[in-house]
Image (tube, helix red, strand yellow):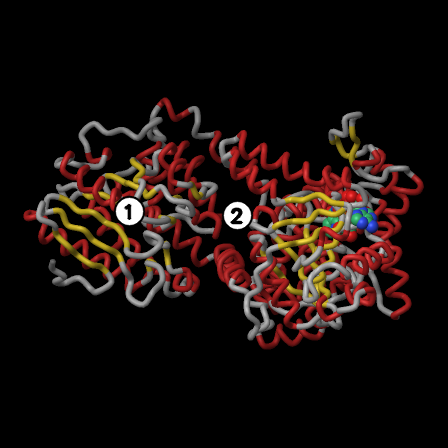
Amino acid sequence: MSDIDIPEDIRYDVDSDGIATLTLDAVGQSANTLGDRFSAALAAAIDHVIAEKDSLRGVVITSAKKTFVAGTDLNQIRGYNRDNIAELAAMLNAGKAGFRALETLGIPVVAALNGSALGGGLELALACHHRIALDAPKVEIGLPEVQLGLLPGGGGVVRTVRMFGIQQALLSVLLQGQKYPPAKALAVGLIDELAATPEELIAQAKSWIKANPDACQPWDRKGYKIPGGAPGSPAFAQILPALPANLRKQLKGQPMPAPRAILAAAVEGAQVDIDSAGLIETRYLCELVIGPVSKNMISSFFFDLQSINKGGSRPDGYPVTEFRKAAVLGAGMMGAGIAYVQARAGMTVLLKDLSVEAAEKGKDYSRGLLDKAVAKGKMTPQRRDEILDRIIPTADYADLEGADLVVEAVFEDPEVKKQVFADAEKVVAADALLGSNTSTLPITGLATGVERPADFIGLHFFSPVDKMPLVEIVVGAQTSDATLAKAIDYTLAIKKTPIVVNDSRGFFTSRVIAGFLDEALELLHEGVSPVSIEQAGVQAGYPAPPLQLFDELTLTLPLKIHRSMEEGYAAEGRPTYTQNATGVLARMVEELGRGGRSAGAGFYDYDENGKRGKLWPGLREAFGGTTEIPLREMKDRMMIRQSVDTVRCFDEGVLRTVADANIGSIFGIGYPAWSGGVIQFIKQYEGGIAGFVSRAQELADRYGERFAPSQTLLDSAKTGTLFE
Ligand code: NAD
C-alpha cells in the first residue's frame, strides 16, 4: 500500500495483480462532495495514477461512503457571481482535464459504484471505461442538475451525447434529470453491469480489467461517429429544427434557462472535438450559475427542503415518536388516500366510516393503486398484500382501541367532526395525537370538542394524497409543542414534507392560492381576453392555468368560501379585496349556470364524458374580452399578489419560517418552481427587494390595495434583507 502524494481523502491500494483501487473517503464528511478540497484530492490521485501507470494493470474507483460521490458542493456553487465566476470556470476546466487524462491513460479504469452516483459523481464514472453498480435499494444514478436550474459541467453533457447521440442523451438523461435505479440505468446504458454484493462489485471490476487490457473510450477509437449523427450530418438535419421547437412546447414560455442551455451545449459540443466541447459546456454552466433561476432553485429545492426534512420547524427536546396503530375517521377521497400512505409506511390502519361497506370502498382505493404498481413491475405481489393487510376497514369505534394517532377526514362540518372525535377519544390511547384534515375550519374552534385540546392539531393534506408531497400542519391556540413535534414525526414517517403554520382563516396555502385564482377573475372582470389570462398563468410557470384550475375545484365552493370570508372579515373590520372576484363567480354560478367541470360547464366547455373542450365563447359576451394588458404585467400581478400576501401571513404570525413559505407555495399550491417560492421571488426580483417593492407599489397605484407592500416589506427594501 502506498499513499504518496495523495491527500488522506482518497486511499490508494495496489493488489498483487497490479490493479490499483482508489477509495474515495472525504475526511470528516458523511459523503464525498465535489468541493474545492475533494476536487483537489481527486486531481492529486489522478496525477499519482498517471505517474505509476507503467507499473499498473488497471484502476478501480470506488467509495467508502454510503453513496459513491454525492455531486457538487452546492454551498460553493451558490457563492459565485459575475465577479468571481472565472474561478469556477478554471476549476471545472482543470477537473475536465483530469477526467480526460483518466480516460486516455492507456490502462483500463472501472467505476465501481457502491452507492448513488448523481451529478458530478456520475460524471467521474462516465470518464471511466466501464461502470458497474451495486444493485441495492435506494441507489440512484443520473444527472439531475437541470432540476436545480444547472447543467452537468463535469463532462456529463459532452460524454452522454457521445455515448447515446444528441436526441437520446437529451431525452433520457439531460433535459429532465431522471434519477434511475441501477436496473433502469443499465437499460438506458448509463452503466454496463450490475453487482449483487459489495465484494462482487470489486471482483467484477477487477475481472473486467483483466479481460480488457486495451480499454479505450468509443470516442477515442478511429472512425468513431456520434450515434444518430452529428448536427451537420444529413441524418440529423431533419431532427435539428424540431429540438428547440419541442423544448419551447415543453417549457410553455416559462423562464427556465437550464434546458435551453443544455440543448445548446449538446448541439454545439457535438460539432467540435471533445476538449472544445468541454469548454462550451463550462461556459454555459457558468452563465446558469450566475443567473437568478439556479440560485432560486438551489435555495428552495436543496437548502429549504433539506432544512424542513431534517425537522427544521420541530421544537427541540422531544423524543421522536413512532406510530404503530393509526385510526383514520372517514374513508372518502381524503381518508382513503391517508390510509394508503400510512399503510405504506408500515402502520396498521383502522379505516373507519359509517358502514363497513363505505370503509371497504376506501380500502379499494389502496388496492387499485397497489395493483397498478404490481402490474407495472414496480412492486412484488407479496409487498402489495402486506400493505393491504395492514388496512382494516371498520364501522365500530371499539376497533380503534389503543390507537396512537387519529386522523379525521369526515365531512367538512364542525358538528360532525366534533362528534367523531368525542367518540374516538374514548377508545384510543390516552396520549394519542388528534389530527384533523379540515381544509377551512379553524383548528382552535374544533379543539373545543375534545378533552385534550393540547393534543389537537391540523394535518392538512392535499389531493390526491398519494401524489401530493406536502402536509400543512396547523397549530391551534392550545396545541402543545410536544404535539407539534409528534405531528412532524408523523409527517416525515409517511414520507411527506411538513410545513408548520399557525391557525388562521385559510391557513397559509388556501389563503395564498386565492391570490393567483382571484387575480385571474379580476382580469376577467376588467375585460381581458380569457385566452390571454390562461396564457399568462402558464407562461408565469404555474402548473395549470387559473380558469382551468377553477373549473376543477368547482366554482360553487370558492363562491361559498368568498362569501363567508367577506362576512367574517367585515365583522373584524378587515379588507378582503375580493368583491370583483366574488362578482364574477356569482355571475358564473347563479346567472349563467356554469359551476365548473363537475357541473358540465364552467369557464370551459365539456363534452358529455366530462372531457374539457375550449374556453366557453360566452365569456367574451359576459365579461368583455377586448382590454389589452401586457402579458408581463398579468404574470406579475398573479405572482406579486401572492408574495405580498405571504409577507402579510408573516406579519400576522401565520407563517413561521421562510423555508415553510417557499416549499409550501411550490409543493402545495403550484407557485412557479423557477422562482424558488413566494419569498425567494421577492429577494431575486429585478432590482432585489427594493425593485420588488417599487413594482408592488406601482401595481397598487394602478389596480388597488391588494398589491400594497406591508411595513415589513417597506423596511426590507431599505435594509435589503427579508426575514434573515
Ligand atoms: P368525502 O365526502 O369524500 O369523504 C368523507 C367521508 O366521511 C365519507 O366517506 C363519509 O361517509 C365519511 N363520514 C361522514 N360522517 C362520518 C362519521 N360520523 N363517521 C365516520 N365517517 C364519516 O370528503 P373528502 O373530500 O375526503 O374530505 C374530507 C375532509 O378532508 C374534509 O374536512 C375536507 O374539507 C378535507 N379536505 C379535502 C380536500 C379535497 O381536496 N377534497 C383537501 C384537503 C382537505
Residue 85 position within the rendered picture, expressed as x and y whole percent measured from the top left: 37, 61
**Looking at the image, which is closer to me, 644 or 13?**
13
For residue 239, what is the image quadrant?
top left
Q: Residue at x 71, y 53 (%)?
A: 400
In 3D space, how far apart are the residues under numbered discs 1 and 2 (Cα atoms)? 40 Å
For residue 325, what is the image quadrant?
bottom right
Q: Is residue 35 rendered to the left or right of residue 667? A: left
**Looking at the image, which is closer to me, 120 or 89?**
120
User: For the residue marked with disc 1, what is the amino acid?
Assistant: Pro
- Asked if residue 536 can be seen in this view, the reply is no
Q: Residue at x 77, y 48 (%)?
A: 396
Residue where numbered disc 1 is placed: 198
Residue 241 position within the rendered picture, expressed as x and y whole percent measured from the top left: 46, 30
Give the vertical position of 293 relative to 627 (above or below). Answer: below
Q: Is residue 120 rendered to the left or right of residue 644? A: left
Q: Residue furthest left?
A: 55
Give the vertical position of 366 relative to 578 (above or below). Answer: above
Which disc number belongs to residue 75?
none
Near mark 2 (Cα within 10 A), the count class, few <14, some 14-19 or many ≥20, is: some
Residue 625 position within the rendered picture, expressed as x and y whole percent measured from the top left: 80, 41
Residue where numbered disc 2 is placed: 256
**Looking at the image, which is closer to me, 484 or 313?**
484
Near mark 1 (Cα within 10 A), the count class, few <14, some 14-19 or many ≥20, is: some
